[in-house]
Each structure stands twice: as C-alpha cells, then as structure tokens.
Image: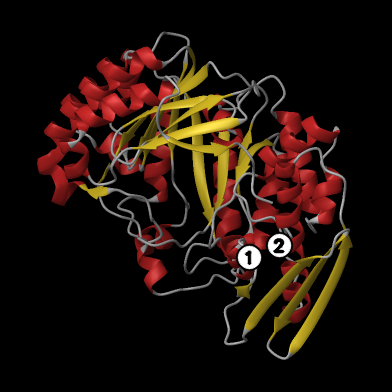
Amino acid sequence: MKTNTPYQADIEETVKLFPPDAAEKEHFYENTGGRYENAVRIGEKRYFFSDPEKPFSDNLERKRYEKRNIKLAVYRALSDYYGRQMPWGALTGIRPCKLAYQELERTGEFLTLFNEMRVSAQKRRLVEKIVETQRGVYEKDDDNADFFVFIPFCPSKCRYCSFITADIARSGRYISAYTDALIREIEAAKPLVKKLRSVYIGGGTPAALPTAELERVLAAVDAPRGTEYTFEAGRPDCITRENVALLKKYGVTRVCVNPQTFNDETLARIGRRHTAADICEKYAMVKDDFSVNMDLIAGLEGETEADFARSVDAAIALKPDNITVHTLCLKSGAALKEETAYLDGAGVAAMVEYAHAALAAAGYAPYYLYRQKYMAGNLENTGYTLPGKACVYNVDTMEEIAGTVACGANAVSKAVFGGCARIERYKNPKDIPSYLAKTEEIVARKALLFAGEGGKTEKNGGKR
C-alpha cells in the first residue's frame, strides 16, 4: 500500500491480514493541528477517517498514538472492503499480553485500547485470563535471566517447519565441532547470569543428538538443582531410555514431547517418522519423572475439525502439565510455504475454539500466547497449564520481563535495562559453519551486551 507516512512496514503488516488481490491500495495521512485525518483508497472505493488528537506526556507517546491511529484507519477500511473482522483487530504485534501489561502500568486497564483496536471480545477475555494465570509467575526484574541453549539438529524437516534446523543425515559431520563450540559458549555465558530464572534447551530436536554429545552439553550447562530446567525432547522417535536417563541425571525438570497431531495419516503427510502409539509410549516413559508439555498444531494440511478435536482429546486424556495449541504458520523456509501464499483459516478458528473449551473443561488455564505473521485465520499460539504448572521460561520470554542468555547457532540473547523498558539484543550467526568460525567473536560480543555496551537497542514497546 502506498503511503505518505514513515510507517510503511506497519501498514503492510495490516494489509497482510487480508487476502491478497489486485486492488490498488493507497493511504494518505495529515495532522491538521488537533485532528488526525486519514484517507484510504482500495480499488475504486474511498474511506475517510477524522479523529481528535489526544494529550500526550511526551513525543514518544504521541508517535505511538499516531502510528496506532494510522494502522486502525487502514484496518477499518480493509475490514469494510473485504467484509471481514479479524480476531485481533488492528493489532499486529506478536505479544498482545505484553501490550496489555504496558497499558495496565500506564492507565490501570487495557480494555480501552483493545476495544479501540477492534480486538474481539473473545480475545480480550483470553488476555484477561492469561494475565490472571500469570500471577505468581510474572516477575519483572532487570537482573533476572533465563539461560537458553539451541540444538539445531533434526532427524528430518517437517513440511510446516520454518525454523533454522539441520537434517542430521546431511549435517551430522558438524555434530562434534558444534558441541565443542557450544560448550565453549556455554562456559563463557554462565557468569553473565545474575539471577537465574530457568534453563531451556530447545531446537531443532535436542534429543536427536547422539547420547555422548548430549551428555557433554548437559554437563556443561550444569544447572543448579531445583531450577526450572526444560528439555525440548521434541519428536517422540528421538526419545530413548538412554537420553531420558541422562536428563534425570543432570536435573532436568520439564520435558517437551511434541506430537503436533495424534492422527497417523497426518503424521506421515507432514514428514514425521512416528505414530500416535509412539507418542503415548514415550509420554509414559517420562511422565513420572518430569513435568511434561505437549504441542499440537491447528490447521495441518488435510486435517478436519474432527481430526484436530481427536488430537486435543487424546492429549487431555494423557493429562500432561502443559498443552500448547499452535496455529499453523507458513513462513519462508517451510515446504508448505512454497505451495500456499495465504492461509484463509477456514475451520481453523473452530479448531482453536474447541481446544480452548475442551482444555478449560479439563482444568487447564491459558498462561501465555504469542502471534506470528502468516498465521491461519490471523489467530495465535496459546499455552495452557494445569494449576501451579506454568513454565517460567515461556512467561519470561513472551512478556520480555527478563534477560535471555542464549547459546548456539541462531540463538538471540537479550539484555533488559531500566525496569525492562529497554532491550538490547545480540543474534548469533544462523548457519552452523558461520557459528563455528565466529565462536570467539560471539563470546566477546555477548559479554559486551550484558555489560550494556553492545547489541541492537530497542525500546520495549509492543506493536499496536
């Protein structure tokens, strides 16, 4: 969409909420001194919006409101033109709850803003419930930090996956060198943590590492006993009695067993090398010694609402401590992205609604959520927890209320300052060869980041 404002990227995010077509789109904005005037043209149809300027405490607040007003005007025009209301209205940021917390701190409530941005009543209630569930876990402190370790290897790449991962059959030659570099980074990074909140080993599929290499990583992390310590075992076909024994030995407290679906036909279709029976078998292997999280995806290719409902019911019957419901998201790097440019989300909203109702009836409460671009139905990913079982790492990461000391290829470290109002980031190289070549530079740059002397700086403000 053409515009005369500096908010081109924000406007394009709003445009992408709606189906792509050939209709030409233009936006013109003017501040007339007391009013915001927006003119939007979509094809031959024209829209005009005139809103009063509000009093602001500073110029930053004024610019935030101006951007929000422009995005809302564009959304209102597109919504009318296409005859569609989006569940999150004109909000395009990935962290709606973080935005809610900012409004709570600023005004004591967030519903006014969410109403203005046309967020549906259902999603407003979801955010309210998450804020409620996070009580006792949410802790905003510049000194707090979560320790993250990334293992990029996978046994194969699923068709929906866009993560930076390495097929172990093709990249196995890097495993030993990667482990060496990762341990070097871990040992240098541990002193950067002031107050440890949690440890998380993610991927990829960390359980795909050979047992000897996995033990080297676990020994290097050496997390203090009693710390929340999550291992994203991932695919059930990689969980073995040997690596489960190692997790117990090194004090891991939480394990992710991620089926995505309990339908065998879908598992085969998306490139998984296991069955629903394998999921149940591997869950039984870990459930007595660890808190367990399971992931499901709404909108997988070929699945009906009934298929997804069966998966939700199967997960609930196993009763893991956490169940996360993801909405299918197609990004660059996913095989499905090459075949599908836009996800309309027909039926996916019903899947998400079924999961929410079924999980609530089974005693689960939503405790974190995040959004991504190109999500089916412009929905969200939501984590649900049994009472007292919320994952600290997920809350800290989604709300950005603690630093992240991150190790491994493509890992992103974050340092927070000024009551978590300012974030500085440092991103490690994505590919394994570059990571191996730059390990010492990474160690030095990260030390500067947590000393407040390096990294990419940004204000800790959610998109609106």
Is residue 382 in view from this perspective?
Answer: no
- The reply to whether dot 1 and dot 2 touch (C-beta < 8 Å) is yes
**Mark nearer the N terminus (1 vs 2):** 1
Q: Mark 1 = which residue?
A: 11
Is residue 167 in view from this perspective?
Answer: yes
Disc 2 residue type? Lys
State which quarter of the image contains the N terminus: bottom right
Within 10 Å of disc 2 (Cα), the crowding (few <14, some 14-19, many 20+) is: many
Residue 405 locus on image (x, y percent)? 41, 25
Q: Residue 127 is drawn in which quadrant?
A: top right
| Picture residue at 85% right of the left edge, 35% below the top | 107
| Picture residue at 41% right of the left edge, 68% below the top | 337
Quick one: SS at disc 1?
helix
Residue 99 locus on image (x, y percent)? 70, 41
- 20 vs 227, nearest the viewer: 20
Q: Residue 157 is drawn in which quadrant?
A: bottom left
Q: Mark 2 = which residue?
A: 71
Quick one: SS at disc 2?
helix
| Picture residue at 42% right of the left edge, 19% below the top | 451
Q: Is residue 171 found left or right of 299 in the rendered image?
A: left
Relative to 246, residue 336 above or below: below
- Name the outermost residue toward the left: 173
